[in-house]
């Protein structure tokens, strides 16, 4: 197979489709999203059948149970995918929005208008719902999407993408607005990452290994986050019950995701009162503690935290715990060891809360809320196409706004420069 | 000289200074900018003396008169630099601005707050005023600046940077907030472009060669524009006098800059009426015409435009001219040959103007205004740190807003995820 020719063809089609998608009126885009949603539900059996083939191959290949779970589709999960598309359809169209307009002394009226980026390449693993989410977000924001899903979900992704393309054709949308790469060889990814003239942005979604490989090989800008070392800082002025709830929710509600907490920072005034029962409760929930010396005084079966623990994304029932002498020390810890993902403070003191929010420059900074709320849906973006922990272009969970840019527009009346 | 150690030292200092500058209150930053402005004026003689050394060396090396002109400082130019800094001081502080805030059904109040990028590296040629402009824009936006000016302006840049650093010290600002690289060897640029852990953004300002070299060698994101092939499209509904004024202003007011017009597109209904006297007038102003066949029918001494002419940034008294049969054809021409810099339409028809603005996705799209108005000062950004013709992060002339990003902030009251 000549992969180079295949990739050239895909990239060229995407560029042409992107030019047309950029000009589609809102009702055409939203109508198509609604129709895809209905079609997904109506095609539930066919999608489940394709999914069954992936699951069978996965079981035969012996892939791990958590991965099998992420790969599995059910009627409820297909329904959630459809609802996701309806939610995206209901969002305001970002394209053409004039975000600001002002008058210059020359008489020139200047503004900024939102436009699509062009062509978005998303490289992802296992979860087939990403196919529908990303295709929907890209279409809504006037971009063409090139999707390269994992080999383990190939049949499921193909079934979903085909429904998208078939519906597009009938809805006045170029079918190449969404292309699923028809092979999963790794060589194709490398070839795609060279197409800087046709592809405007790459979003890798998956493990740190995948993301580093993409970032290191891409000539195209990459939206990325390597890991989520999220912190809960419990201030001396925290409501004790709230601090307990937020810590346990942030750590335990789902341990395998990037927005779960990995490190608890506790103000020293709470080290002998609030902390011991909390540690006991966490132990009861099966959470292993890696503590600083002051923490270990309160936790007989904890392990001593090493420098490595402060930087670790456990994605498991493990929590690093450190007692700090002040919020300053807590903020220093976050700056030194954090990953710019999500940090939360628990406090009832307004001055403390304001200072934490002002001084911590991670991509998500919360007050009295679980770190697990850090995702596009919970924050009100409708859905997310990825998360950025680097500051260029977008910072934090990224929805349709991050898939756009703004051009300058200006209206004069024969306005010249002197 | 061990350049690697020097660059490590500069980058490390910049990162530390950046952390501190990010937290400075507005009045400290603005006070420092005001003091630098006064100090520049008060040190006029010393700056002119340093400039005289550069000019002498430049003449001895036989550099071209336009370059010498850009290198030359005068009391008026130093005054303009000082006024530029006062203008920047008068802008609202972007840092800490909450651009939007909304409520989620969970009770979470979510917003986005503007923060600095961190450390900005600017690589530039000849004009010493860039030193003051960039240092001012970076300080205002809470970033540390690493400046690498051209060797031909080394003494002038050093004098200006020293005033900045000395004033910073006295104003409660870390002096390493602004560092001028003390050598101009090209090897240093390559070493700086490797410091992705300390430097967040690179802005090359200069010729296409410099910009390509930086873009190809940088591990750090680059804000760039290679060239400005700007178009004037004169619609059938144009006011003839206004169309003449805008064409001549866009082409002739200053030919050597990226926002001057290089191609004129004319609706065919004007080919035999409005166009011939305009071409004659341009010829009288010394402008050479490279025309399409229909244009050449109206211009005896014009040259036939080749494919190459439509892509060329002349930066000279040369204008490519094409007669088009419709705005569609004009827009297709701009998309095919343009550089995403600046395009302007001259028309009195509202529907035509709206369609041009909607469909042309260059970084600046104007109606009835000269392309020469496309710069940060004219558009109301105070000044500009560079221009981006790629859509990632920023598009168009970039002032202090482009030197920032936005983090998510969220306030709950013990808000958890189910």
Image: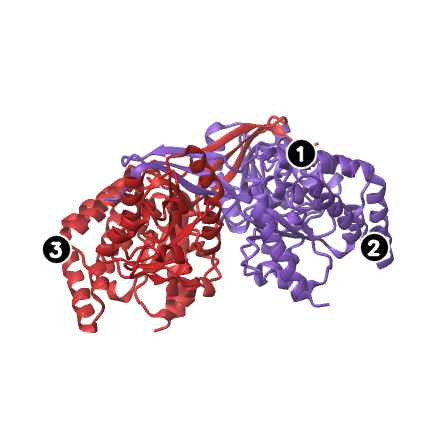
Chain colours: A red, B purple
**Quarter of the image holding residue A349?**
top left
Q: Is residue A247 visible?
A: yes
Q: Is residue A288 above or below residue A397?
A: below
Mark 3 residue crowding within 10 angstroms, few (<14) / some (14–19) / many (20+): few
Q: Is residue B115 above or below residue A45?
A: above
Identified at 22% across, 48% down, the residue is: A81
Q: Is residue A17 visible?
A: no
The reply to whether callout 2 and callout 1 are in contact (CB within 8 Å) is: no
Q: Is residue B403 left or right of residue B132?
A: left
Q: Which residue is mark 3?
A: A45
Are callouts 1 and 3 both on one chain?
no
Q: Nearer the viewer, residue A325 or B333?
A: A325
Are callouts 2 and 3 both on one chain?
no
Name the image quarter holding the N terminus of chain B: bottom right
Q: Position of residue B240 (x, y in %)?
A: 61, 29
Q: Nearer the viewer, residue A276 or A188?
A: A276
Q: Position of residue B251 (x, y in %)?
A: 67, 40
Q: Earlier in the sequence, mark 2 or mark 1?
A: 1
Mark 1 residue crowding within 10 angstroms, few (<14) / some (14–19) / many (20+): some
Chain for numbered disc 2: B
Label at residue B58: 2
Q: Is residue A226 above or below residue A401?
A: below
Secondary structure beneath label 2: helix
Chain for numbered disc 3: A
Q: Which residue is mark 1?
A: B31
């Amino acid at each position: 197979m000549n992969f180079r020719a295949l990739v050239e063809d895909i990239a060229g089609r995407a560029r042409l489709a992107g030019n047309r998608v950029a000009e589609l009126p809102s009702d055409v885009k939203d109508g198509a999203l609604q129709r895809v949603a209905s079609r997904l539900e109506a095609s539930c059996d066919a999608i489940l059948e394709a999914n069954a083939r992936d699951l069978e191959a996965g079981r035969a290949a012996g892939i791990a149970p958590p991965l099998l779970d992420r790969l599995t589709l059910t009627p409820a999960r297909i329904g959630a995918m459809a609802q996701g598309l309806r939610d995206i359809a209901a969002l305001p169209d970002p394209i053409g929005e004039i975000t600001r307009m002002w008058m210059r002394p020359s008489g020139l009226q200047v503004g900024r208008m939102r436009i699509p980026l062009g062509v978005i390449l998303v490289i992802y693993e296992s979860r087939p719902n990403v196919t529908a989410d990303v295709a929907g977000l890209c279409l809504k924001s006037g971009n063409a999407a090139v999707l390269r899903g994992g080999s383990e979900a190939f049949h499921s992704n193909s079934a979903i993408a085909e429904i998208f393309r078939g519906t597009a054709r009938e809805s006045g949308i170029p079918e190449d607005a969404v292309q699923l790469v028809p092979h999963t060889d790794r060589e194709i990814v490398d070839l795609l990452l060279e197409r800087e003239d046709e592809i405007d942005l790459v979003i890798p979604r998956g493990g740190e290994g995948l993301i580093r490989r993409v970032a290191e090989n891409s000539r195209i800008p990459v939206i990325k986050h390597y890991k989520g070392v999220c912190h809960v800082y419990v201030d001396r002025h925290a409501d004790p019950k709230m601090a307990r709830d937020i810590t346990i929710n942030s750590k335990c509600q789902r341990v395998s995701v990037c927005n779960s907490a990995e490190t608890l920072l506790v103000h020293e005034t709470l080290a002998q009162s609030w902390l011991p029962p909390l540690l006991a409760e966490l132990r009861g929930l099966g959470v292993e503690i890696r503590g600083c010396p002051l923490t270990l005084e309160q936790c007989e079966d904890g392990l001593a935290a090493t420098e490595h623990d402060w930087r670790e994304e456990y994605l498991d029932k493990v929590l690093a715990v450190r007692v700090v002498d002040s919020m300053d020390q807590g903020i220093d810890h976050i700056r030194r060891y954090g990953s710019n993902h999500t940090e939360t403070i628990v406090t009832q003191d307004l001055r403390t809360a304001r200072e934490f929010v002002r001084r911590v420059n991670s991509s998500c900074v919360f007050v009295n809320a679980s770190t697990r709320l850090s995702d596009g849906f919970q924050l009100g973006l409708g859905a997310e196409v990825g998360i950025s922990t680097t500051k260029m272009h977008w910072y934090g969970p990224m929805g349709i706004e991050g898939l756009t840019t703004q051009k300058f527009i200006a209206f004069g009346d024969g306005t010249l420069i002197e």
